[in-house]
Amino acid sequence: MKVVAKRKVNGSGTVLYRFEGDLTVYTVKKLVPALIKDLRAHAALELDLSGVHKFDSAGYQLMLLMDRDARQDGKGFSISGKSDEVSRILSLYGSEL
C-alpha cells in the first residue's frame, strides 16, 4: 500500500508525474493537494500510470477529478501510460480517459 510519485516539469509547462505502486483508497488522499496545486500552476498535467500495480475506485475518482478540474480551468490533462491493472479498471467503468 505504497505509491511513489516522481515529478518533472518540461519546457512547455507540463507537469509529468510517474507513479510506481498503488493508487488506491490508502494512497490517493495524500496525492490530491500536490496534483491540484500543480494543475493550477502549470499549463497541463500528464500522468504516467504504467508503473501502477493496484488501482481501485479511489484511483479512478482521482483521474476523474483531475480531468474535470483541468477542463474547468482550461488546462490540459492526459494519461501517457497505463498498466494492465489501470486499463482493466478504466475498461470496467467504460472510461475514455
Image (spheres, rainbow, N blue to C red):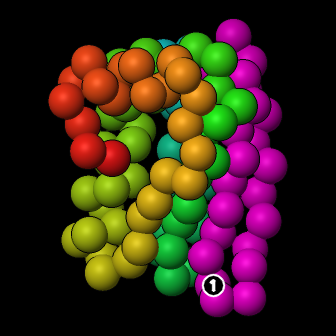
For this orientation, the residue located farthest to the left is 94
Specify whether 92 is left or right of 81.
left
Q: Which residue is drawn at 52% across and 18% down?
A: 85
Q: What stretch is highlighted in magenta?
A: 1-24
Circle 1 crowding by C-alpha within 10 Å: few under 14, some 14–19, many from 20:
few
List x then y, in percent, for residue 81.
58, 45
Q: Residue furthest bottom?
A: 12
Q: In the rendered image, is residue 30 in sight? A: no
In the picture, measured across the screen, residue 32 lies left or right of residue 96, that is right
Q: Nearer the viewer, residue 94 or 60?
A: 94
Give percent across and percent down for residue 52.
Answer: 64, 27
Q: Where is residue 39 in the image (x, y as percent from the top left)?
A: 50, 68
Q: Which quarter of the image is occupied by the N terminus?
A: top right
Quadrant for residue 53, please give it. Answer: top right
Q: Main secondary structure of the magenta part?
A: strand
Indicate whether residue 17 is drawn in magenta.
yes
Q: How many marks?
A: 1
The residue at 74%/74% (across/down) is 9
Residue 4 visible in the displayed image: yes
Q: Is residue 6 above or below residue 50?
A: below
72 to 1, vertically: above or below: below
The residue drawn where x is 31% and y is 62% is 69
Residue under the image location 26 percent in, 45 percent down = 96
Q: Name the residue under label 1.
A: 13
Measured along the vertical axis of the image, is residue 88 above or below residue 77?
A: above
Please provide percent x and percent y for residue 2: 74, 18
Q: Judging from the image, what secondary structure is the residue with disc 1 in?
A: loop
Q: Within the magenta stretch, is there residue 56?
A: no
- Label 1 amino acid? Gly
